[in-house]
Amino acid sequence: MERHLYTTTFLHLVTLLFIFRTISAVRFPPGPTPTNDLDFIRTSCNATLYPDVCYTSLAGYASSVQDNPARLAKLAIGVSLSRAKYTASYLSKLSRASASAAVRDCVSNVGDAVEQMRGSLRQLREMNHRRPGAPAFRFQMSNVQTWMSAALTDEETCTDGITEEMEDGETKTAVCERVADVKRFTSNALALVNTYANNGA
């Protein structure tokens, strides 16, 4: 009898140990993004020309951004830069198979935009310890605004050239659509940079 009781108790303990180890091994998914973080993204995006595109592309990073306008500006430029690099790669491949001078010009334009955005992002990262409102902050933010504005101009120059010089067709439509997509992201990033610059000045 005692032996049976001992065996039963032992089995219960083994079962409990297994349950506890199983529970501790489970990796629960992270909690939902706090509503105030998402509200900050949404409110900030309302100041852009394409708020839906802005919110959709940035909301997934709300927990990292929180309510920090500097982080939001850097993130927006990073997202725009990624889209521009992807489009630059597409245009480069297209130019090798096309005799169109407009496409070759577009490769140069979008490539210039990529470099402008890289410079903007690098400048913002170097400003981590700058105090908003200080002369150095205003000067460096002015650089970022100038470069992002130049990037948008480069992209517009690309689509203007394609529209005016390229014959209608699938290639023209594809190029215009891809560059227009990049322009929306760059425009939004510039708007968020301007908001940060104006509020921090």
Image (tube, grey):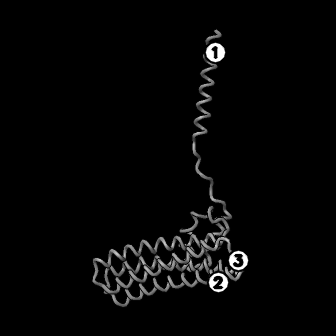
In-image side of 147 versus 39 (left or right): left
For the residue marked with disc 2, what is the amino acid?
A: Phe
Q: Is residue 154 above or below residue 15?
A: below
Which one is earlier in the sequence, the residue at label 1 or at label 3? 1
Query: Crowding near pointer 1: few (<14 within 10 Å), some, many (20+)?
Result: few
Which one is earlier in the sequence, the residue at label 2 or at label 1? 1
Query: Crowding near pointer 2: few (<14 within 10 Å), some, many (20+)?
Result: few
Q: Residue at x 43, y 79 (%)?
A: 111
Please provide percent x and percent y for residue 43: 65, 73
- Residue 181 visible here: yes
Q: Nearer the viewer, residue 143 or 76?
A: 143
Disc 1/disc 3 C-alpha distance (Å): 71 Å
Please provide percent x and percent y for residue 99: 27, 83
For the residue marked with disc 1, what is the amino acid?
A: Tyr
In-image side of 99 versus 88 (left or right): left
Q: Which residue is mark 1?
A: 6
For the residue marked with disc 3, what is the amino acid?
A: Pro
Q: Residue 158: name its quadrant.
A: bottom left
